[in-house]
Image (cartoon, rainbow, N blue to C red):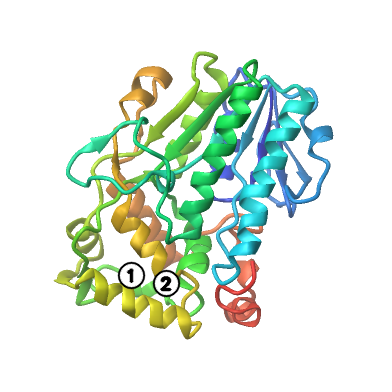
Amino acid sequence: MHVVVVGATGNVGTSTAQALAADPKVTSVLGLARREPRLEIDKVRWERADVNDTDLVSHFRGADAVVHLSWLFQPTRSPAVTWRTNVLGSARVFLAVAEAGVPCLVYSSSVGAYSPGPKDRAVDEEWPTHGWPGAAYSREKAYVERLLDGFESDHPDCRVVRLRPGFMFKREAAHEQRRLFGGPFLPGRLVQPGRLPFVPAIPGLRFQALHTADAGDAFRRAVTNERARGPINIAAEPPIGPEELARLMGARPISVPPLAAHSALRVAWSLGLVPASAELLDLALHVPIMDTSRAREELGWTPAHSGTEAMGEFFEGLRTGADLETPPLSQATSGPMRLRELVTGVGRRP
């Protein structure tokens, strides 16, 4: 089996490529990304490609499956740029899959595609996917779900799987996620247990985390299991809330009203101190808790790491400066003393 992974060098892409390469059913993997990495993985060959303008059909011909993971989180201050890559780029991927005659498409959707939902019970894949309109990330994920609806209707011979993961973490991706969401002014060593006296406990903040290696395994299973089709939630237990975050950081939770937290983040974003907009906090407050029964039953998938273990690895990665030799994950991408982050503007350019 020959598999093409679009967006293969990031947090999810590297784990998916590693999981596919370890599967005896998979003979070769073509990893596509805007910048070639120095990372070497058995069975994996790298090529440059951009979903915005590359001829993707030539890369997809002869593939048994295409896994679409490419996604642009920044610049949050230019939503037209992220829309072009995430929505229009995804449309180009789907059209190329059809033109190349690829029999299987696996797409990474998100819990962020879901409409606001409950935190005290889990919802299954039938929950509406209209997103949270305030956040560009959520709007784009929801819109791509509609694109997939049309694609499935027009191309019934192509098996489509849309995995909807929770928030994904691993040690080696901590630097990238700090850069994308925390910005250059966040000291990684600040998250060492006991270093902070308290953490803000925002009522309603409860989300599901997932170790990215477990996500990669789910994508592998979606590719190789010919019975898998349609939307599938993937996440680990337990859900993460203020109490869990406080325990992981060895700090005391202090209640902070959502409006106060939103306002503080809005001011920091407006001043260019952080790249993550306040709307992403709103999204985390509104996403539902997902039922992952279908992943267990149809994929035979069970996460090897708990949600708290995944978050713990992320904090450890921040403290130790863990990374990987790919442009999205490497510390070198930020430049010495994070100067490249500052020069390009916090959240202003990708």
Residue at 53 percent of width and 61 percent of height: 176
**Residue 107 or residue 215, whichever sits in front:** 107
Residue type for callout 1: Val
Residue 95, given in percent of the width and then of the height, sits at 73, 34
Whole-Å distance between the Cαs marked 1 and 2?
Answer: 6 Å
Residue at 46 percent of width and 69 percent of height: 276
Q: Quadrant of residue 260?
A: bottom left
As displayed, is residue 220 above or below residue 40?
A: above
Residue 214, given in percent of the width and then of the height, sits at 43, 36
Find residue 209 and name its label: none
**Residue 319 or residue 205, whichever sits in front:** 205
Residue at 74 percent of width and 55 percent of height: 35
Find residue 188 and name its label: 2
In this view of the protein, can residue 74 be seen by the observer?
yes
Residue at 37 percent of width and 31 percent of height: 125
Find residue 191 and name its label: 1
Residue type for callout 2: Gly
**Circles 1 and 2: CB distance less than 8 Å?**
yes
